[in-house]
Image: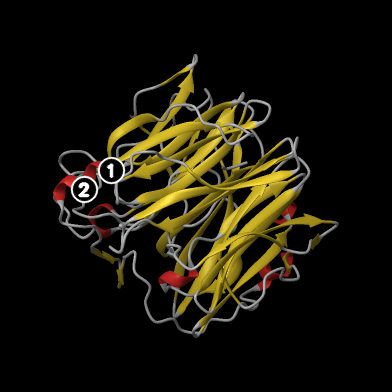
Amino acid sequence: MKFLKLIPILFVGVAILVSCKNVKKKAITPSKIDATSEIVALLENPSSGNSSLPRLFGTENQLFMSWVEEKDSISVLYFSTLENGKWTKPFEVNSGNDWFINWADFPTIAENNGNILVSHLQKSAEDKYTYDVKMDLFSAETKTWKKDILLHNDGTASEHGFVSVVPYGKSSFYAIWLDGRNTVAGADGHEAHGGPPMSLRGRVVHADGSMEPAVELDNRVCDCCQTGMTSIDGAPLLVYRDRSAAEVRDIARIGLFEDSFSAPHPVYNDNWKISGCPVNGPVIDAYKNNAAVAWFTAVNNISKVQLAFSKDKGKTFGAPIQVNENKTMGRVDVVMTSENTAIVSWVENIGDETLIRAMRVSKDGAKAFPVTISKTSFERASGFPQLEIVGDSLYAAWTNVDGDNNSIKTASISIKSL
């Protein structure tokens, strides 16, 4: 269960402009890539029209997926559940004509004993990067929805987003987000690299829509990399891209240990010094008292997908294992299949093709043969592919780019074949 100051970055042999902005898309159709693709079975698509930004959330026996569809000038947020191998009829959670829709900053969904929390982003002012995190919350007790709950209360017209949510307690949730309230002092907007930094904040959201006071977890973080969060023994364990005063932007973790949040601590010191955000956040998953973190780095212009394991509830992590062998754009996800193994997904270039790949990796560094889930596009519109495990089944979701229209694809994958 798992739970954009931007610069061009030169990857080995290929230049990719990393940005919060959308660009012209080109058609890429999922198809069989190699012999391994026979273990990937496409599921019937629950979405229709121009759809994107899928997010998966799995419980012990149920899979949820949220996504957004664009209908003229209206953005519509849906979710569906997978039952007997088929997606249920989509449920429309909310819609609006003033939402912030971005390839890298997407809604998220989580469930806790029948309570469901879904987030979306809504513009708060005319400036491009001024938007708020709104939440839509279903109560299992009252069988009703509370919509458009504001996650933060700073009242600033600034950037708020990159949300992660996990169940907390018997019916509540813990939510974290990147908060731009301190950046408004710079008055130079999102593109200014030297201004005040974003902060990382979190709070408990109860099933009735009430919230505990927000806590500042880190006062200086990378501007627009996705956050990641999981839960061990009911306690949140979160990862994000930190930002030092010297502009080193490596992955840090914070855990709720002994009823208090720890100070930020590096998962590993890549020492990746860059003057802007790479828009490539970390992911984390847990199995019993163990955790696995996957992330992207490009120190010395060498692009890597790294994986590190923890055996002590995330307090410490071992040396990283490099997952990719080809040029990669990152966009990672990870799920743990046992205390000592994880399945990692990432996007990489092989020849003229851009592929979504997955691999089983063991704590001792042993790596299985990589499997191609699908062709994809290197364009930003293809987003961040998702993995989730429910029972003994692995599922994937991604955005298929087809000209000016996008569509969501989902598939089940044989874990035993990885």
The residue positioned 21% from the left and 48% from the top of the image is 184
Side (left or right) of 333 relative to 201: right
Of the pair 283 and 76, the residue shown nearer to us: 76
Amino acid bearing label 1:
Arg
Amino acid bearing label 2:
Val
Q: Which residue is mark 2?
A: 184
Q: Secondary structure at mark 2?
A: helix
The residue positioned 30% from the left and 55% from the top of the image is 298
Say if residue 342 shows up in the picture.
Answer: yes
Dividing the picture into quadrants, the one containing residue 70 is bottom right
Dividing the picture into quadrants, the one containing residue 265 is top left
Is mark 2 in CB contact (under 8 Å) with mark 1? yes
Judge the density around disc 2: few (<14), some (14-19), many (≥20) Cα neighbours within 10 Å: some
- Image coordinates of residue 64 in percent, x first then y, are 69, 52
- Image coordinates of residue 339 in percent, x first then y, are 63, 32
Say if residue 281 shows up in the picture.
Answer: no
Is 276 above or below relative to 206?
below
Of the pair 72 and 334, the residue shown nearer to us: 72
The residue positioned 48% from the left and 23% from the top of the image is 256
Dividing the picture into quadrants, the one containing residue 217 is top left
Q: Which residue is mark 1?
A: 181
